[in-house]
Image (spheres, rainbow, N blue to C red):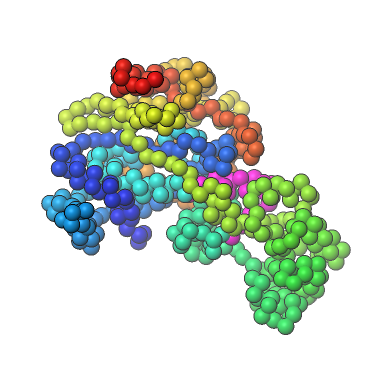
Amino acid sequence: MALNLTLLTDLYEITMAQGYWSQGKRDTEACFYAFYRENPFEGGYGVFCGADQIADLIDNFVFSDEDLEYLKSLPSPDGSRLLDSDFLEWLGAMELDVNIDVVAEGTPVFPREPLVRVTGPLLQCQLLEPAILNGINFQTLIATKATRVCRAAEGRPVSEFGLRRSQGPNGALSASRAAYIGGCASVANVLAGKMYDIPVGGTHAHSWVMTFPDELSAFRAYADAMPNNCTLLVDTYDVIQGVKNACVVGHELEERGYKLSAVRIDSGDLAWLSNKAREILDADGLDYVGIVLSNDLDEYTIESLNRQGAQYTGLGVGTHLAAAYGQPALGGVYKLSAIREPGESAWQPCLKISEQLYKRTIPGILNVRRYYSDEGMMAGDLIYDENDGIPDVAVIVDPLDSTRRKMLDYSKHEDLLKPLVRNGSLIDDYELSPRAAKARCREQLSVLDDSIKRFLNPHGYPCGIEKSLFKKRDDIIVQKRGTSALY
C-alpha cells in the first residue's frame, strides 16, 4: 500500500478549508489548474511527469484518527486551539469527490498550458494543491533533464547514478522513475527498480579494487564473482594500466566462455582516456568491450566529449541529473480558474491579474489542443475553455504579447488532458507504467522540431491562448480593475 499523503499539505490549506467550511462554502465548486511559466534549463520544452504521486494521493486520501488528533493539538498564536473540533470531525468523515485530468506522462509540454486540472468541491481542491505540485514539479524537472542528457548521448545508453546525491529517499525514487521516463536505459537504485519495474544496472566501486592486494587481483575476483555482468572500473590508480589489466581479465573470461562487458572511466580527461582505452582494447582483440564514462556529466559536458571524439558506448550520469543540478525547482503553480456556487449551472471564470504580466493566469475550464502538421510534426498548442469550444479557424495569441498570433489550420489534433480521477476515484484503466511513458516520450520528442530541442537558444514552440478566450481575459481584467488601476 502506498504512503498516505493526506497531510502532505501546507497548514494554510487546512485553515482555509476551515474557513470555507465555516462560511458555508462546503458545496461551492471550483476548478484549478497546474502549470509552469518558463521552460526548465533555459530549454524549449518540458516533459510532464509525476501523475503517479497524484494517483497515490487520491487512492489513499483519508484523515486518519491519528491525523485528526495531531491537527487537534495544533495551537494558535494566542495559545488556544487552532482548529475547530466540529470541523475536524467533519474532515474525518469527508470523502473526496473531485475530478482530475492530467497530461499523459512523457508528453512534451510548454509554459502556461494546464498540466493538471482539478474540479470539485473548492475545499477539497485546495487541500490537494501542495501534494500535486510536489509530485509534478520535481518529476517534470528530472524527466526533462533526462531527455536532454540522453539526446546529447546520441543514442548511446545512459544509466542514472544519482541515488546518493538525491534529496532523500523519496527524491531518489522519484528521480529514478522520472529519469527512466525521460530516456535513461537503467537506474542504479534497486528499490526504484522493484517499485516501478524499470531496469537496474551497476558496476563496482573503487573500494572493491582497494580491498585487494593489487588491481589485477581485484579484477580477477570480480570477474569470478560476476562473469556474466562484468564491467571493470579502471581509474582507481592509473587508467592506462587499469585498461591493460582489464584486457588480461577479458581474455581469461573468454577462456571460460564469457565476455568482458565494459570498462568504466570515472575521472580524468575522459575524451583522451577513452580514446586510449579504445586503442588498447582493440589492439588486444577486445573490440567488443564497451567503454562507460562517468564523473559529473551533464548534457553540455557530453556534447563536449562528442566534439572531442570521445570513444564511449554508455554513460553514467548522477548528480547533474538526479539533483536537477543548475535548476533546483521547476516553479510550477496551481491557480483557481473558475468557480460555481450551489444551484448554478454556469461556471464563473476567475483569474489572478497580478502586478506582473507574466504572473497573469487564464480563466475557465481549461484544456490544451495539440495540432500536428500534415507531416506529423507538432505544429502548435491551443489553450481553450471547454465551455466555449473552439471556432472553425483556431488562432492562438501569445499570453505575453497580444500582437504575436498564429493560425492553427491543421486537421489532425488531440486534446492533452485526460481523466485520471472521477468522483474521487482513480480511473480503472489509466496507464501509469513508466515503460509506457518512456515510449510516449520517445515518440513525442521525435515529432518535435530539432530547433526546439537544441540546448542553446532554442526556437520557441507555438503555444498560446485561443483568441476569443484571450479577449475574454482582457475584458475581465478591465472589469476587475475598473478605472482605478495605476498606470
Residue found farthest to the right: 283
At which x and y percent is residue 132?
A: 37, 47
Specify whether 276 is left or right of 350.
right
At which x and y percent is residue 142?
A: 52, 49
> Looking at the image, which residue is at 40% across and 51% down?
53
Look at the picture and state if 235 lies above or below 309: below
Query: Viewer-proximal residue, 106 or 306?
Result: 306
Q: Quadrant of the N terminus?
A: bottom left
Q: Is residue 476 at least partly visible in the picture? A: no
> Looking at the image, which residue is at 80% across and 70% down?
241
> Looking at the image, which residue is at 65% across and 48% down?
299
Q: The magenta stretch spans which residues?
A: 139-161
Residue found farthest to the bottom: 213
At which x and y percent is residue 402?
A: 47, 19
What number of labels is visible? Answer: 0
Quadrant housing residue 317:
bottom right
Specify whether 307 is left or right of 335.
right
Quadrant housing residue 468:
top left
The verdict on residue 128 being magenta is: no
Query: Viewer-proximal residue, 259 or 303?
Result: 303
Q: Is residue 148 at least partly visible in the picture? A: yes
The verdict on residue 152 being magenta is: yes
At which x and y percent is residue 404?
A: 52, 20
> Looking at the image, which residue is at 20% across and 57% down?
75
Q: Quadrant of the C terminus?
A: top left
Q: Main secondary structure of the magenta part?
A: helix
Query: Viewer-proximal residue, 426 or 456?
Result: 456
